[in-house]
Amino acid sequence: MAGHSKWKNIQRRKNAQDAKKGKIFMVHAKNIYLAAKQGGGDLGTNASLRTAVDKAKADNMPNDNIERAIKKATGSLDGVSYEEFNYEGYGPGGVAVIVQVLTDNRNRTAAEVRHSFKKNGGNLGENGSVSFMFDRKGYMIILNEDDEISEDEITLQALEAGADDVIVQDGGYEILTAPDSFDNACQYLKNNGYQLEEAEITLIPQNYTMLSPEDEEKMNRLIDMLEDNEDVQDIYHNMKTDD
């Protein structure tokens, strides 16, 4: 899976978030809300929520804000009601794109996402038009920037945890699991001393599309524009990225 786009997406998102520290609590609140909505508000049984909360605390998000986001998601606090859904379409050069959003105004978000596609040479499609090109997987990142974790070590531990695959990247490892093995794998790795930089159920492309330099530039502009939209939670695509 060389050139795996998920790793690149996360690096891009981190850079974008670092440049917008004023919005970081809003990003964390939505991520916590989404994780609690999907898997419940119990940190003990929801690995995605634990990871989202840990990241929020690392950025000094107040506990009251964290608890409020969880309560909104579980229906125990009145407030803004968010909807989660996906847009599907094609970017420049026929790249398959799925945009995951969390919004309190579906009409506004639809118009903004449609505009982003149109402005950058893409077009939105119907539900199901590209989702068949992706597999739903549990996904984790373990950083290894100082080369302290050997490939053999993490591969053995990940397989013991129930992982399907370990992908070596520059500066870390990606670990893939079946969705129903995700929570147990997260807990196993944490219990064995590994820190999970990312942990989520995500979409992984089955194959990748190579673009011309011109189309790749347009596709990167589309991604940048979507990432600037506060309603966009994640962007999945099958553009082939550099190794």
Image (tube, helix red, strand yellow):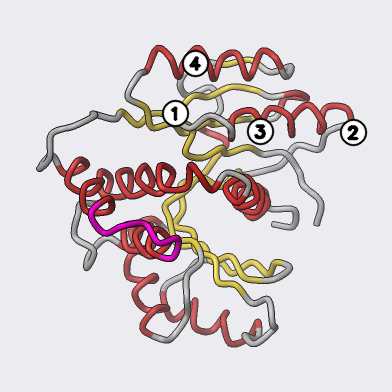
Q: What's the residue type where badge 2 is placed? A: Pro
Q: Residue at x 54, y 20 (%)?
A: 113
Q: Do the residues bearing badges 4 and 2 touch, measured as CB atoms within 8 Å?
A: no
Closer to the camera: disc 1 or disc 4? 1
First along the sequence among labels 3 and 1: 1
Q: What's the residue type where badge 3 is placed? A: Ile
Which part of the image, by quadrant, shows the N terminus? bottom right
Q: Residue at x 36, y 83 (%)?
A: 191
Mark 1 packing: few (<14 Cα in 10 Å), some, or many (20+)? some
Mark 3 packing: few (<14 Cα in 10 Å), some, or many (20+)? many
Which part of the image, by quadrant, shows the C terminus? bottom right
First along the sequence among labels 1 and 4: 1
- Tell me the distance, in whole angstroms, between the alpha carbons under discs 3 and 2: 15 Å
- Tell me the distance, in whole angstroms, between the alpha carbons under discs 3 and 4: 20 Å
Residue 126 has which mark? 4
* Residue that extends furthest to the front in the rendered view of this protein: 22
- Tell me the distance, in whole angstroms, between the alpha carbons under discs 1 and 4: 10 Å
Q: Residue at x 62, y 19 (%)?
A: 116
Depth check: 86 or 209 in front?
86
- Tell me the distance, in whole angstroms, between the alpha carbons under discs 3 and 1: 15 Å
First along the sequence among labels 4 and 2: 4
- Tell me the distance, in whole angstroms, between the alpha carbons under discs 4 and 2: 28 Å
First along the sequence among labels 3 and 2: 2
Image coordinates of residue 96 in percent, x first then y, are 64, 30
Under circle 4, the secondary element is loop
Residue 86 has which mark? 1
The residue stretch that appears in magenta: 58-64
Residue under label 2, please give it: 213
Image coordinates of residue 74 in percent, x first then y, are 16, 44
Residue under label 3, please give it: 223
